[in-house]
Amino acid sequence: MGNRSSLIDIYQGFLSENVKEFLKNESEIVDIIHKILCESFFKGKEEDKLIKLAKELAYHYRHGKVHQNNFISLVVPYYNESTEVIIRDYFILFSVLENIYKQMVNAKELDWKQHERFMLFDPFMGDNTFLHYSRSEDNQLVFGQDEIFVETDQFIPLFLEREVSGASKTERATLGWLFFPIVKLAREAGIDFPIVFDLISNKTLILTSKKNPITRHSQICCNDSVEGFLYDVVNNSSSFQSLIHILDKTKPSSIIQIEWPYHRFDESRYERVLEPKYYLEIKLKKRFNPNLVKEFGSGLMLLPGELTSLDRFYDYSNIDELLYVVKTKEFLEIVSKLDYLKETWENLKGDSYDRPFPVKWLTLLNTGKTLNYWERSYENTFPSVPATVQREVKAIISIVLKENWLDELILKFIEEDHKVLYVLLPRGRKYKSINRDLQEYLSQCLEHVQIIYIEHYDLLYGSFSGTLWILDTSLSILFSIPKKEGTKVIIPIPDFHFALRLLYKKVQMLKMTNDVLLGNETNSSLRRTLLTNEQNSSLNGIYNNILQLLLKEAREKSKFYRPEAATATTEYVEVYEDEDEEVYEEEAEQEFYATRRAAVSVNEIDFSKPLQITLNDGTQEFINPLERILINHRCNFINAYARELKPGDVFAKCKNVLSSLEETDDFLKSWTKFPYAVNEWKKKLKDLENSLGNVYERLSRLIGPGFIQPQYFESIWLNPNSSIKLPLKRQHWDALCIILNIDNKDCNRAWIAVKSEQKIEDSRWRAIKNSLLNVLAENGYLGQLYNMEAMKETVLILDREPYFKEKGIETRDVAEILLDDLIHALSNTAEFKKVEEIISSNITEELNAI
C-alpha cells in the first residue's frame, strides 16, 4: 500500500481541478486579498507557514458564504502560541478588505454624486486628517479650506461625513494603516474612479476567547470595542449585556469566532440575538482528535495531512514505513492469552479509563526490575481491576518479561552508533510509574547516548532531528506524525502488540479519513460542495476498493498470529479510538460540550425551573441550573453549569469543593516537602558509579566549566552519609536529575523544599491559598493542569508574596506543583456524586432557597 496514492492526495487533486473551474471566483478573491495582506502586514519569513494556513481557512470561509452556509465551523488540528495571534490578525484584516472589495465591485462611476456630505482622508497630513468636500469643477473634486484638488479619473477613497467627522485618534490611525492596502486593492480590482465607502454598516464582529490578546499588529487588531471602523472585536471576558444593545444597532452581517484550547466562547447567545447572515467558527486544536469525528455536528473537520500549508503527514498508505515489529519466541501463547483476556475485559463494569486493557502497559516491561516488582506495580497502578483478572495479567507479565523485546531494539540502536535519541512515551496518569521505570532502564542501557523525552505536543511543533522512537500507538498519535527532514521516525512494537492493536489500524485510519473527507452522516454538506457529485462518487469508489485491499491484508496477517482461529474472529470490528486512551484536558472539555450540543435538540428540561436530581445512592437534590459545578469526565475535570448535567455524569458543586479544600490545613503544601523519590539520590549515584563508572566524566560533560573537583565529588556526592541535602548550584542538581532519571517535577520539588526550609507563615499561606482557589473557580480553571491562563493567574498571585523572591524560589515552579496538587486533592478530597435522573421541578420555592 505504501506506493499507492493516499485518499487525501486524490481528494486534493480533485480540489485543485475545481479551483481552476467552478471554484475559480472565490479562489481569485482570496488570492487578491491574501497578496495585499502579505505585502502590507505579514512580511516575516517565520510567519509563512501560519499565513498560508490562514489563507486556506479564508478560502473555506469564502466558499461557505457563496454556497449559503449560514453557520460555518472549521476544526483545525494545529495550534501553538503564534497560531492564535496570526489567525486572529489575518481574519480581522481579511474581513476588512473583503468588505472594502465588496463595496468596490458594487460601486458605479458616478455614485459619489448621490452623497452630499463626504470627506477625503489625507494620510500625509498630521494626525491623519479628514477634509470636507467643497465642490466639483470639471473632472476634479475640491476638498478643505486649502482647496486640495483631486482628479475623478482615478481611484479616491471617500468617507461619509456623519461617520468620520468625530473619529477618535485610534480610529484615524486604524484608517491610516489601512489606507494604502485599500489603494492596492482598488488597483487589483481595476477601479479608476472615486468611491464613497461605508465604514459602519456590514461590519464584521470578531469574537475571541482570550483576555487581552497579544498581537503583532496592535495598531489595527487590538481595539477591543464595538464602535470602531469596518470591524468590531469582543473577547469572552467582556460583558454580554453591556455590549449587546450596541451590537444590536449595527447588526453585524458576519461574525467570526476564533477559539483555541481552554478558551470556549458561548457563541449561541450572539448568534441568537444578532442573527448574522454568516457565522464562522474557527476551532484551533493541538492535534487531530479522533474522538471528535462522530461528535462533531456541523462544519468542516480538517485532517493534519490535508492542510497543504503545513508539513506532510503519514497516513494509512505509508504508516507501515515507520513500524519496526520485533519478533518474540512465545508470541502465539501471548496473543492467545491476550485474546482470552480481551473477552474477560469486555465484561468488566466500571470506568474503562481507570483500568485500560493492559497491552500498552505490557509493551513497556523491561528486565530493569524483577517479576515481583512488576506484579506489585500493576496491582498498585490498576487497583480497580478485579483480583481474578489481575492473576491473568500476571501470568502474561511473566511470559512478556522473559521475552524482553526491548533488547533487540536497543542493540540495533547501539550498532548504528547514534549520539542522540528522542523518545515519545504513552501519556496519561496511569503510565507515569512504568514510564519512569523505562526511562531508568534506557539510561542504563544507553549510557553514552543523550536521551530526550518529548511530549505528544512536540510531534507537531518540536524542532528536532535524529532518531525518534514512538512508543504510543494510539490512533490520535498515528494521525499526527509529520514528515520532518532529518528525523528518522520508528514505531517499535513487539509482535503481540501488533496483533492486538495494529492489525486493523490502517483500516481504522482509512475509515476515519474517508468519514472526514466525504462527510459522514454527522457532518454538514459544506465538505461535499467542494467536490462535484462525480468526484464524490469516484472518491467513494476508490475508498471502497482500498478498504477491501486493507481488510484482505489484515485478515491474512491475522492468520499468522492466530492460526487456530476461525475466519469470523479475524473480521474487522469498527472502532475509532483506543477506548482507554487518556485525552488532553482541553480535548475532554471539547468532547464533553460536543455531546451536550448534540443532545440539545432532544433535551426537554425546562432550565427556568430548579433541577431535581436523583443520585445513584437514591437521594435527591435541588440545584439552580446556573450553579457552577465540576464534572469528572474521562479522568478530567470539566468546569460547567448545572444545566449541562445529564444522567451518568459524576459531579460536585463548586461551592462544596471549595469549602472542603479550604478546611484542609495541609492542602497545597507539598512544595515545602522533600519528595520521597529523591531521598536516596546519593546512594543511587554511588550505585550508578559502581555499576557503570565514569559518572563524574558524564556530569562534567553535561555541566561544562565550573563543575566541582573530583575529590569533592567522591567524598560528598558519592557518600550516602554526607550532610549535604542537595548540590549548592541548581545547574548541578539539574544535571544529576538527568543521569539519575529523576523526573522534572520531583527535581523542582526537591530544590524548592530545600530553599523553603524556613516555612512561610500560616496566615500568609492561608490567604494565598484562598485567593488562588477563588480565582481558579471564578474563571473556570479548577482541576486544569496545563491551562496556560490558569498558570498565569497562579503565578500572579504567588508573585505578590515577597517570600518567594526572598528565598530565590521560581514562582512558576511552585505554580506547577500547586496545580498538580489541586488535581490530586479534587480526586481524593472532594465528594463527587453520580447522576441517575434529572427532571424540572415545579417547586419554585426550592429555586429561591438555593
Image (cartoon, rainbow, N blue to C red):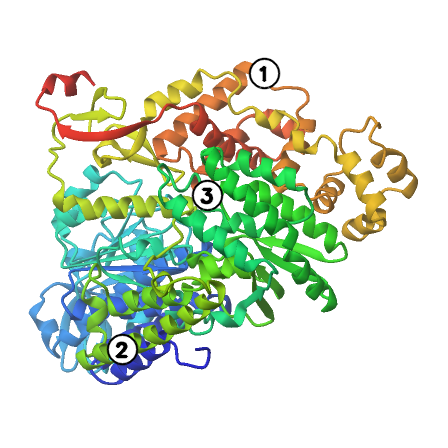
**What distance separates the C-alpha of mark 3 from that of mark 2?**
42 Å
Residue that appears at 39% across and 42% down: 352
Q: Picture coordinates of residue 4 (x, y %)? A: 41, 81
Residue under pointer 1: 761
Q: Quadrant of the C terminus?
A: top left
Residue type at the position of mark 3: Met
Residue 747 falls in which quadrant of the image? Answer: top right
Residue that appears at 25% across and 27% down: 627
Mark 1 element type: loop
- Contact, CB < 8 Å: mark 3 with mark 2? no
Q: Residues within 10 Å of mark 1 (few under 14, many from 20)?
A: few
Q: Residues within 10 Å of mark 3 (few under 14, many from 20)?
A: few
Residue type at the position of mark 1: Glu
The answer to whether residue 845 is left or right of residue 682 is left
Question: Residue 442 versus residue 241: which sits nearer the camera?
Answer: 442
The answer to whether residue 49 is left or right of residue 613 is right
Judge whether 503 appears above or below 592 on screen: below
Mark 3 element type: helix
Residue under pointer 2: 539
Q: Picture coordinates of residue 171 (x, y %)? A: 29, 55
Question: Residue 492 versus residue 24: which sits nearer the camera?
Answer: 492
Residue 742 falls in which quadrant of the image? Answer: top right
Q: Which mark is residue 788?
A: 3
Mark 2 element type: helix
